[in-house]
Image (cartoon, grey):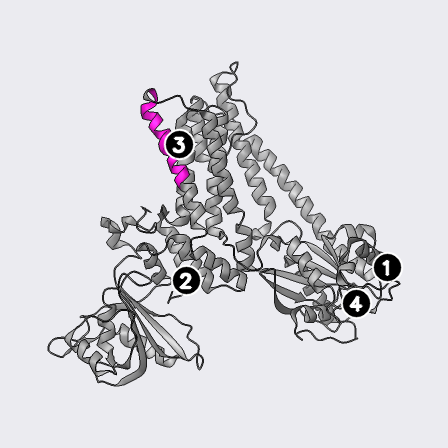
């Protein structure tokens, strides 16, 4: 069942008859530890309760230190919201003290979930907080006779993300804001945290809700014409087409932020490769401001892959220092294994930096390393060519007409079965029969489907791995040790294109090799010269240049991006159906799908299984 808007766009259908059987809307009082449980670490740990029994369950185990608070609790007076109480947690069975705590009640609706919420601030570590939680989950209290009763209170352990889920269901947050909470908790950089905060403030939901409102408004106008066309003015198709284009542009603008989110969340892996003693380890240490890699004058010091973490343009980057690559390892088994791991690291990296010793100049070993990288590109191109041929044959095989149906039946069948587009087919040719029109309509959908399938397959390889080659940078290292006729006075001069060309020529790097790289940078690991240029070049080739280093911009995550793509595809199909003069019935099909996809982003129109996927990613206490 889909969920309609309630409050901030959450589920109005939560009050339906089937709500009681929902796996995530049972109305229980829930409890969980909201802070990391780390042995012998952390001064304070927090337990969070939410639900109708939150206050009563807390009072069953809490004894305030102040006499006035104890008297109020004994009389059953309501807790004062947003006022901290100091006291002790005691076991109701024997009165044994469990911990000294602070209790902070936040009564409905002024709480995170809009329910009664109580936070118990216990001592940190893993023992004290676990004991308090276990006491709450024991569901014990004293009835009127003073005897212990295990059924008078019900508190259960919260499921992953259930507190935020309740905030969504109760209208405190929309789905984009709920996901922003997860992004904020899991942020790895300042940029990611600031971006999540921007989304939490509604930065992402705003344009999406506006686009959905426009789609719904247009859909209502078109559906009205299906019933009252004779009573309305003639439909201006050009106006509808223009509104569709503007709507598509607005959705596409939000979709363009998805790569920014992917980079912030997953980061990238950069492999430093090159021949032995090219300065890879020194470059890793200088770049990461650490001493992770051993550096000596002996060639081949690094035998295994060494990792270091940095941040470039707000993107988490994992640097891999690899063993020097050379064909002749002189029978050294350990070095041979290291070379294999270096090639594997380069193959799996998101970007590769080929480090060349500018002092020693371009050598045959450098060419061997470069060819090993370029060789994989040739294989990838051949695989892509084969996939293209397969896609073409698929298109031909699926382009046969469906007999026994008129034109619009064929079109409707394909709309639901293939979800392709109409491209380069004139279906309104007056000299064509209905069967010929249906055939061309069928073929257009099949061609679009095959083209879409090829685009997706060419973007990903086996097991979803990227089929295109990783971006490559050429780092001319050790330039501080190279005699220079006219010594540069600033880093900007060395960064100049003419100066870089001069450096590559002085190092003897062939022009065809230079042309194969996405960027060339001159560096010195010893003086840290050129590292800022290296970061700028890396940010540019991986697409992080559009990522605001201050992290002020929100971005669409993977789930949201998929829904945005569905909306864009539906709007593309709408444009084609308008162009080819199909009836208004067909227009409404695509508009309805676009509106549904946009509603799935904010939670205004979302299925329960989508909520399960979103909120199970959260930690238990969030």
Disc 4 versus disc 2: nearer the observer: 4
Q: Point out the stretch of residues depicted in magenta.
A: 213-230
Residue at the right extreme, as displayed = 485
Within 10 angstroms of label 4, few (less than 14), some, or many (20 or more) residues? many
Determine which of the numbered discs, if any, sits on residue 478 in the image.
4
Name the chief secondary structure element in magenta: helix
Q: Earlier in the sequence, mark 4 or mark 1?
A: 4
* Snapshot quadrant of residue 388: top right
Q: Are marks 3 and 1 in contact (CB under 8 Å)?
A: no
For image coordinates 45% across by 29% down, the residue present is 240
Mark 4 to mark 2 CA distance (whole Å): 47 Å
Residue at the spot of label 1: 506
Residue at the spot of label 2: 618
Residue at the spot of label 3: 588
Q: Are marks 2 and 3 in contact (CB under 8 Å)?
A: no
Q: Earlier in the sequence, mark 4 or mark 3?
A: 4
Element class at badge 3: helix
Viewer-closest of 573 and 334: 573
Element class at badge 4: loop
The percent position of residue 359, horizontal first and vertical second, equals 84, 66
Viewer-closest of 92 and 43: 43
Q: Earlier in the sequence, mark 2 or mark 1?
A: 1
Residue at the front extreme, as displayed = 489
Mark 4 to mark 1 CA distance (whole Å): 13 Å
* Snapshot quadrant of residue 502: bottom right
Element class at badge 1: helix
Q: Residue 355, relative to residue 412: is it above or below?
A: below
Mark 3 to mark 1 CA distance (whole Å): 65 Å
């Amino acid at each position: 069942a889909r969920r309609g808007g309630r409050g901030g766009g959450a589920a109005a259908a939560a009050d339906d008859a089937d709500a009681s059987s929902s796996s995530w809307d049972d109305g229980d009082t829930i409890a969980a530890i909201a802070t990391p449980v780390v042995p012998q670490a952390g001064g304070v740990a927090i337990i969070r309760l939410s639900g109708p029994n939150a206050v009563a369950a807390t009072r069953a185990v809490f004894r305030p230190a102040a006499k006035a608070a104890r008297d109020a609790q004994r009389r059953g007076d309501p807790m004062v919201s947003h006022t901290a109480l100091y006291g002790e947690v005691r076991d109701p069975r024997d009165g044994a003290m469990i911990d000294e705590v602070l209790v902070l009640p936040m009564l409905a609706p002024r709480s995170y979930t809009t329910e009664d919420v109580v936070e118990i601030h216990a001592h940190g570590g893993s023992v004290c907080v676990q004991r308090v939680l276990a006491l709450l989950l024991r569901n014990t209290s004293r009835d009127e006779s003073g005897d212990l009763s295990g059924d008078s209170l019900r508190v259960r352990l919260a499921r992953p993300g259930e507190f935020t889920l309740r905030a969504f269901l109760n209208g405190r947050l929309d789905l984009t804001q709920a996901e922003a909470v997860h992004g904020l908790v899991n942020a790895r950089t300042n940029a990611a945290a600031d971006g999540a905060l921007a989304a939490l403030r509604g930065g992402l939901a705003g344009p999406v809700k506006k686009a959905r409102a426009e789609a719904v408004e247009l859909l209502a106008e078109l559906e009205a014409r299906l019933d009252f066309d004779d009573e309305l003015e003639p439909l201006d198709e050009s106006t509808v087409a223009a509104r569709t284009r503007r709507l598509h542009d607005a959705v596409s603008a939000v979709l363009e932020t998805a790569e920014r989110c992917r980079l912030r969340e997953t980061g990238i892996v950069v492999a430093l490769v090159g021949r032995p003693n090219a300065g890879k380890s020194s470059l890793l240490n200088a770049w990461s401001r650490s001493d992770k890699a051993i550096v000596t004058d002996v060639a081949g010091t690094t035998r295994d892959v060494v990792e270091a973490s940095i941040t470039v343009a707000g993107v988490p980057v994992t640097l891999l220092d690899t063993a020097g690559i050379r064909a002749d390892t002189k029978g050294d088994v350990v070095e041979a294994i290291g070379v294999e791991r270096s090639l594997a690291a380069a193959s799996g990296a998101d970007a590769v930096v080929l480090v060349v010793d500018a002092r020693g100049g371009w050598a045959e070993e450098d060419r061997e390393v470069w060819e090993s990288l370029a060789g994989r590109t040739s294989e990838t191109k051949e695989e892509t060519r084969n996939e293209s041929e397969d896609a073409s044959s698929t298109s031909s095989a699926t382009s046969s007409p469906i007999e026994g149906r008129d034109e619009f039946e064929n079109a409707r069948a394909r709309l639901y079965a293939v979800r392709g587009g109409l491209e380069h087919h004139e279906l309104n040719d007056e000299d064509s029969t209905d069967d010929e029109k249906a055939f061309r309509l069928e073929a257009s959908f099949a061609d679009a489907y095959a083209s879409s399938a090829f685009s997706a397959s060419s973007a990903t390889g086996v097991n979803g791995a990227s089929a295109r080659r990783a971006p490559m940078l050429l780092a001319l290292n050790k330039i501080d040790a190279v005699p220079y006729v006219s010594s540069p006075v600033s880093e900007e001069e060395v960064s100049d294109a003419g100066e870089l060309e001069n450096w590559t020529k002085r190092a003897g790097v062939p022009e065809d090799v230079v042309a194969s790289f996405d960027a060339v940078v001159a560096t010195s690991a010893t003086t840290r010269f050129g590292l800022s240029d290296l970061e700028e070049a890396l940010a540019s080739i991986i697409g992080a240049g559009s990522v605001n280093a201050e992290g002020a911009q929100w971005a669409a995550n993977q789930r949201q991006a998929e829904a945005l793509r569905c909306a864009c595809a539906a709007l593309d199909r709408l444009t084609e159906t308008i162009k080819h003069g199909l009836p208004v019935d067909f227009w409404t099909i695509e508009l309805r799908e676009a509106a549904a996809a946009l509603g799935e982003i904010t939670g205004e129109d979302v299925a329960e299984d989508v909520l399960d996927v979103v909120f199970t990613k959260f930690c238990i206490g969030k």
